[in-house]
């Protein structure tokens, strides 16, 4: 043991996943035949061997204390021999073989404050990022908005009453960690004020040529400030991408008055039916209004509900909009159409309406 | 810790409601942990002032690694000294995010000792995120992690932690073993994962079928999506049962087929499999009756990324179909050729998708020695601006029709 | 002319075959006209050498006009002296390209006297092209043309000769009077047509319905395409007759409706006119049974052009619906505002479509005082790069939420 | 008369079209009820008043001698009181009220060498441009290729045996007069060799700054030649657009060895069914081979016939390809797929296949 301690172990990679697979999965790995959603948050996978695997999916805040993780572990021990997993949308899933344990588990999860659901035609967890909890770049908080929106939409998580799945995601700045750019509804933190150059300290903190080069619109030019090399921002050219800030801390864009949230709609990732699509701008700007961002919550709820009421079965947000057209979308959701909706970036011309296929 | 209880009226609002509360999580941790306590305070301040209070991260990490830690410092260190350092560790998760209660408890114990007691399960790339600790704790955490068999994930201009859907472990539609491939790639590229040496980040994401439950097509430099080449498997009796059970097969299944290659006569479904584009819709709606064919493999796509700064990209088809079995030689050869070409010619902070657009897909394909095929495109070019690389000279040689480099 | 007959073995090949032969036309003219004779010779040379033999045109024209003539000179003037000058005149055609035999003969007489005797009926923009004459003939031709009521068309950076489909003259689907509007615009913009003063060319094309028989959406800076706002008119008996006569209404009509807004129960067609996108297909296939609604007008689109040099553009919707009746005040006001903004801010050789892309559609709309509406776009922006023009300052004023120009 | 001669008349515009309308049109202007195609090249328009207008459409070479125009005039006098028109695709149309005169007219047109047709589901005239007949820019001839192609495809003009209309167009250089960029089949002359700078004479003929500015790829830079200002072309950057040549005669791209023809497919202009579409590259390069360009003729014929055999009724070329997909298109037409087909211009990324919707 003593010598082992000396040797610094590196590059071992993660543990092999097999260590963590319950026996029913090991035995039926690659042999699943079909699945069925039994009720909200509960599904069964049936193997060629006849074996059944029950999955109970519970909501999670993603930001978890070790205390909570230990409680998950306790539940896993109690109901499923200690096996559990997390999903690609940060829910937690308990993997059972004994059907009779499903309801007691759900009961315990409810008590713990983690409602079960998010399967089938529902709203699953909101994929999100750090926000004011950990990131220097954030134009808004992440967890607070997610909590506020999901509190309001919880019925769509715990029930399956929507036309299809709907994926909501949030990113707290244009870097878009979490790839919100292909979501049915994306909530995106945006800056709207050019970087305030920390003129005197810039030279010390950053390399001027890379700061200048970082700007995609050539809005940054070298300048001198009190005899020292620094930079200047041509404000009309700034599109608030914060790329300069990523390479140089002396170019902050964060600004309480001008930061806020934009809402995007109609993206998808799956290849089911239609090809993957980017989300498109629905609401250019909503000011930050913590702690519960009521305007953002209201906007998202409105979008969900107008879609839910009007979409055909299996029709994702973007598929629905493609069928009815954007003019009808703006009309039905009551969102005002503005200059900002019209693309003026690289491919703008391709987003214009280049036919007379119109409704009146 | 002996301080009187901090007032957080704004955050308290977020303890209400039915959705799990992250504020409760922070408060729970704060009960025992001063970092979490100061995080709460600083976050309340952000909620009051509508602005974050973190400074740009410096370069911190563990010995010999170039990534895996995100440095973070408070810009209010006097008021919130316990988050003056608040670095996160990205810990490479086990493929598919499966755990035992046992291993989770071990992870918690480490983080109780050395960090804020707060985590993300998981980060957007897939890592286990240990949220907030001091520089001096990094090595000890790392040591204890490797002791229990864990290692750091990626950050910076390296191979990022590969991730995948649960695939064959729990899904009947997995067309290849996503978890096996993810583990293989993670281990194969350990050096590239820990020691940034690329122009920018490189992400792998593995999805078992075209449903793409890990959003690989939207956010990975290489997206590997399972698919099949032969005929959809059908259980005719099960089809009849779905019909009986009230599924509107004409409207909801056949009517939504993008290839319009299905036919339902009230009794049987017929599929023109040559025309089927493998979208999964019919299978999704009738999992007991339909499933992917038997000749399974994957499509390899390249180049998606978030919008900074040239606009977002979706991955596009590079290899329409490949069989994916160990030792994955063909795949690794391909990836290595791409890495080589990109590492040599990519600009700083240029993702491979942007690189391809800059140099041209045709040139890129030539460089990585892949034949251009029409499956790679939605449609051929619409503009007449072809960069022909060769022309004929007027001397004798050329009038014979011999091409010459100019 | 007393020369022995020129040998043109290559071109002779093009006298064969069933399609009308342009070589025969040149030969016919060459029998009486030395210019046509030398054209034949020079063209044969081009066919031998696989290269054109024309030089860049100089600036030639008629007094007081900046356009209407394309200067052209042979680069083999010694060999083909009669085409040493070979300028063309663009003559503004009558809207709809209707003629009487009488007026055609008068045109021919003029060209017999003053030019090569060769024409294009018509040029791609729509003009009558008188193909090939000498500089000194330009004024006489012009004089004789105006004598019979004709005038030159556009060339250079001016309003080009507007053209249109035959519209109400011979088509049941014309939703506005294309020929009347074409004549009106041509007359209204005589000065702009003859005296180039814009950054680049400006083309108007008028189509009576969405079939766009004049390809306006592909090649005019302003495309005016007829359409309607109310319900498609239907003659139910005629529908029944089409069905009887063997038209497969379900497959060929209903099945091709892009809005999927038609229904055929074997007896009647039902159309959900709110959803109909006015594509014309059903009307095209059943002209006796269906026709455009009664509330007719046009959609105004802007900005199409050929690819040089930023890539081709299609026109895009500017005004989804406008009634077009004399005196066309609303239209003219709109065009004038656009011309003003473009003339003032456009770069040299920048078509209006390129100009809009450069300054941004939103800014363009603001400048021409047109409200942005969702009908103008295929979809809203996908990228987050919005150029907000205003932000709040931190003094008291602004915390009240007042916006200020920065 | 003498004084009138003095006054130079300008800006009178074209004659009013009304002067040239036959009485049946004047009387039924805007009152047409429906039309019917009676046989190839012949249609009738029926008015609300009951009046009938017969149109006979004849082919034309567009490049017409005055001799031929006079012959048209004679026919118009003989059969339709002197009224005729030309179409937007350069055919000639005779406007009759007497049905019995249709066949004799067709007969006379046939003798004159102008077959009747081009209506309904046919190939109409090929819209084209000047070529070596009149333009300095031409990378190929226009009229010669059109003649050769139409000779081969004449049966599709004189009969109506195609699934839908098919529009062929030709432009002799990238300026694309005639807007070939939205045609079912486009034949496009292309240069493939960078401009050969006429170094010594450039200064005299052109403004150097505008020559440099004219290049969209910044391939032209100022240089000195024998002490005189001139320009130089960075050949790798040249995409052969000839924009420099348009502004400066001393930058010719014409080159017998490297000029030739490319073929494009699947564009359309009408809004019928699908929205208008651009044509896409099918065959990057075919060398010029006058007088009859057999390779071009063969390629066009192959495209027409593969489409004709496989398209559904009413399916234009582009609609057919969209249904079967480009991989099948290349397979069925036997055209080899090459690097050049893949876009590398401004919007290239949008033309890549961004889904796994594939057939095998
Ligand atoms: C922690 C995490 C968000 C989260 O809460 O989950 C994250 C956090 C940051 N990301 Fe990210 N990214 C995270 C996943 C992503 C993803 C999603 C993914 O990987 O699937 C994306 C979009 C996909 C992509 O790569 O394009 C993403 C796109 C970016 C970008 C834009 C990169 C681009 O090429 O467009 C940046 C900016 C940069 O690299 O400079 C960025 C930068 C950052 C930085 C390092 C901020 C910066 O400017 O230096 C953030 C540190 C936050 C902090 O204080 O902890 N992050 N980032 C995710 C990593 C956790 C993990 O390892 O599991
Ligand atoms: C557990 C998980 C994979 C994992 O390894 O973690 C998963 C699991 C399943 N997915 Fe998924 N999907 C999971 C994320 C995704 C994602 C990714 C995402 O949301 O970020 C997508 C792409 C979403 C998009 O298009 O934007 C996704 C698109 C689908 C689809 C296609 C839905 C569609 O119609 O577009 C199906 C098919 C279906 O549901 O009928 C599907 C189907 C399924 C099935 C039925 C597959 C199976 O047989 O087991 C699983 C249960 C579905 C359910 O929850 O209703 N899964 N699925 C992920 C659960 C996330 C969560 O907690 O909610
Ligand atoms: C004669 C004609 C072709 C024909 O045979 O029919 C023609 C001939 C020329 N065009 Fe054109 N264009 C002709 C219709 C067009 C059209 C079609 C249309 O107007 O509907 C287009 C495409 C639509 C458009 O405007 O975009 C067209 C797009 C161009 C361009 C590219 C302009 C652009 O912005 O993309 C150029 C280059 C330029 O302007 O420098 C050009 C330039 C030229 C020049 C002047 C050559 C030059 O580089 O200076 C050609 C003179 C040829 C000659 O020697 O006679 N021509 N040109 C057409 C005019 C006849 C008429 O007045 O009726
Ligand atoms: C005479 C002419 C207008 C003119 O003022 O000169 C004309 C006349 C008619 N067009 Fe057209 N079109 C004429 C050029 C066009 C063009 C423009 C072009 O080809 O450059 C188009 C757009 C082509 C495209 O999309 O690329 C055009 C797209 C149509 C369509 C839509 C076809 C489709 O399905 O896409 C129809 C509807 C139909 O044929 O059923 C149509 C229908 C008609 C009708 C039936 C309209 C009517 O009721 O009179 C006319 C006879 C059709 C026929 O020839 O089969 N016309 N038509 C043009 C004849 C050109 C020629 O000589 O062939
Ligand atoms: S989206 Fe922006 S603010 Fe949020 S975690 Fe990522 S980089 Fe930070
Ligand atoms: S935010 Fe973006 S656009 Fe603005 S100055 Fe910085 S890099 Fe340039
Ligand atoms: S991507 Fe396909 S294989 Fe993977 S979990 Fe989703 S449905 Fe199953
Ligand atoms: S997988 Fe998709 S494309 Fe194939 S048959 Fe099923 S629904 Fe149609
Ligand atoms: S565009 Fe419409 S109105 Fe004009 S001729 Fe064609 S079909 Fe008739
Ligand atoms: S005009 Fe077009 S969209 Fe409207 S009903 Fe007819 S086919 Fe459908
Ligand atoms: S396409 Fe080019 S070569 Fe042909 S006429 Fe137009 S400018 Fe001249
Ligand atoms: S042909 Fe075009 S790309 Fe080439 S040098 Fe001239 S302007 Fe530049």
Image: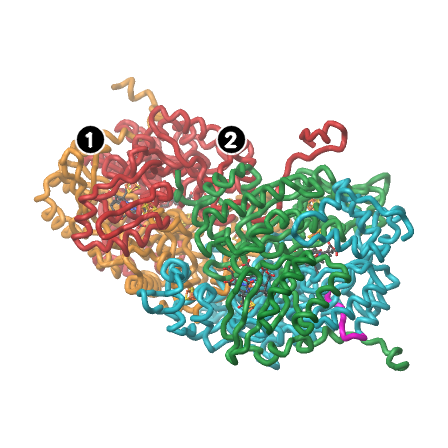
Chain colours: A green, B cyan, C red, D orange
In magenta segment, residue C77: no
Q: Could you say where residue A260 lies in the image, as x and y percent from the top left?
A: 67, 42
A15 with respect to D39 (left or right): right
**Magenta segment:** B147-155
| The one of B296 and A91 positioned closer to us in this rendering | A91
B215 with respect to A320 (left or right): right
Could you tell me which chain the residue with mark 2 belongs to? Answer: C
User: Which residue does the numbered mark 1 point to in the structure image?
Assistant: D26
Our reading of the magenta stretch's main secondary structure is: loop
| The one of C326 and C343 positioned closer to us in this rendering | C326
Q: Could you say where residue B387 lies in the image, as x and y percent from the top left?
A: 52, 60
| The one of A63 and C239 positioned closer to us in this rendering | A63
- Point out the frontmost of discs 1 and 2: 2
Residue A182 shows in the view:
no
> Quadrant holding ligand 8?
bottom left
Q: Which residue is drawn at 40% across and 66% down?
A: B242
Outermost residue, top side: D3
Which of the image's four quarters has the N terminus of chain A?
bottom right
Determine whether the residue tagged by mark 1 lies in a helix, strand or loop: helix
């Amino acid at each position: 043991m003593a010598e082992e301690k000396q040797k610094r172990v590196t590059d071992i990679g993660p543990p092999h996943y097999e260590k963590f697979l319950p026996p029913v999965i090991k035995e039926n790995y690659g042999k699943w035949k079909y699945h069925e959603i039994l009720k909200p948050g509960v599904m069964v996978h049936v193997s060629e061997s006849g074996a059944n695997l029950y999955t109970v999916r519970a909501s999670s805040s993603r930001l978890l204390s070790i205390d909570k993780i230990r409680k998950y572990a306790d539940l896993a021990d109690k109901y499923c021999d200690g096996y559990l997993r997390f999903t690609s949308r940060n829910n937690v899933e308990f993997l059972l073989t004994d059907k009779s344990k499903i309801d007691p588990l759900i009961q315990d999860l409810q008590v713990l404050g983690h409602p079960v659901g998010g399967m089938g035609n529902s709203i699953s967890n909101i994929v999100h990022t750090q926000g004011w909890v950990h990131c220097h770049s954030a134009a808004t908080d992440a967890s607070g908005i997610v909590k506020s929106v999901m509190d309001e939409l919880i019925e769509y998580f715990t029930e399956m009453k929507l036309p299809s799945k709907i994926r909501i995601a949030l990113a707290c700045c244009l870097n878009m960690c979490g790839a919100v750019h292909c979501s049915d509804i994306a909530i995106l933190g945006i800056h709207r004020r050019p970087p305030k150059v920390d003129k005197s300290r810039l030279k010390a903190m950053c390399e001027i040529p890379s700061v200048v080069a970082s700007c995609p619109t050539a809005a940054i030019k070298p300048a001198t400030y009190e005899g020292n090399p620094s930079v200047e921002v041509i404000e009309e050219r700034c599109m608030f991408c914060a790329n300069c800030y990523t390479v140089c801390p002396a170019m902050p864009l964060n600004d309480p008055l001008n930061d806020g949230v934009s809402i995007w709609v109609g993206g998808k990732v799956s290849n089911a039916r239609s090809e993957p699509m980017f989300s498109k701008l629905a609401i250019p700007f909503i000011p930050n209004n913590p702690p519960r961002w009521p305007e953002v919550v209201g906007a998202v709820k409105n979008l969900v509900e107008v879609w839910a009421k009007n979409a055909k079965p299996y029709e994702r947000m973007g598929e629905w909009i493609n069928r009815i057209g954007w003019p009808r979308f703006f009309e039905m959701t009551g969102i005002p159409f503005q200059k900002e909706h019209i693309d003026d970036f690289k491919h703008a011309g391709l987003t214009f309406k280049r036919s007379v296929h119109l409704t009146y | 810790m002996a301080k009187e209880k901090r007032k957080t009226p704004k955050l308290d609002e977020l303890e209400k409601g039915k959705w799990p509360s992250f504020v409760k999580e922070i408060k729970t941790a704060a009960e025992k942990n001063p970092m979490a306590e100061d995080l709460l305070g600083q976050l309340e301040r952000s909620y009051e002032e509508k602005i974050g209070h973190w400074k740009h991260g410096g370069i911190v990490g563990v010995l010999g690694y170039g990534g895996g830690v995100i440095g973070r410092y408070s810009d209010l260190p006097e008021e919130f000294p316990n988050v003056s350092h608040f670095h996160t560790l990205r810990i490479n998760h086990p493929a598919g995010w499966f755990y035992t209660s046992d291993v989770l408890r071990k992870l918690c114990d480490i983080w109780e000792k050395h960090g804020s007691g707060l985590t993300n399960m998981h980060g957007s790339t897939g890592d286990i995120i240990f949220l907030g600790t001091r520089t001096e704790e990094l090595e000890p955490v790392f040591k204890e992690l490797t002791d229990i068999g864990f290692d750091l994930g990626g950050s910076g201009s390296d191979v990022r932690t590969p991730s995948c859907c649960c695939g064959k472990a729990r899904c009947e539609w997995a067309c290849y073993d996503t978890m096996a491939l993810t583990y293989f790639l993670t281990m194969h590229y350990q050096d590239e994962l820990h020691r940034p040496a690329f122009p920018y980040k490189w992400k792998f994401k593995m999805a078992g079928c075209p449903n793409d439950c890990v959003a690989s097509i939207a956010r990975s430099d290489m997206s590997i999506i399972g698919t099949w080449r032969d005929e959809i498997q059908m259980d005719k009796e099960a089809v009849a049962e779905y019909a009986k059970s009230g599924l509107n097969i004409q409207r909801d299944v056949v009517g939504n087929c993008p290839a319009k290659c299905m036919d339902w006569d009230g009794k049987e479904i017929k599929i023109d499999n040559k025309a089927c584009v493998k979208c999964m819709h019919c299978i999704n709606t009738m999992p007991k009756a339909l499933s992917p064919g038997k000749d399974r493999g994957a499509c390899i796509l390249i180049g998606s990324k978030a919008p900074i700064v040239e606009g977002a990209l979706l991955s596009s088809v590079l290899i329409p179909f490949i069989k994916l079995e160990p030792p994955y030689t063909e795949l690794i050869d391909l990836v290595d050729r791409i890495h080589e070409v990109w590492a040599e010619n990519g600009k700083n902070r240029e993702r491979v998708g942007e690189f391809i657009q800059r140099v041209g897909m045709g040139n890129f394909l030539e460089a990585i020695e892949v034949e251009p095929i029409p499956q790679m495109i939605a449609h051929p070019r619409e503009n007449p601006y072809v960069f022909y690389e060769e022309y004929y000279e007027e001397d004798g040689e050329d009038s014979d029709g011999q091409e010459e480099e100019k």
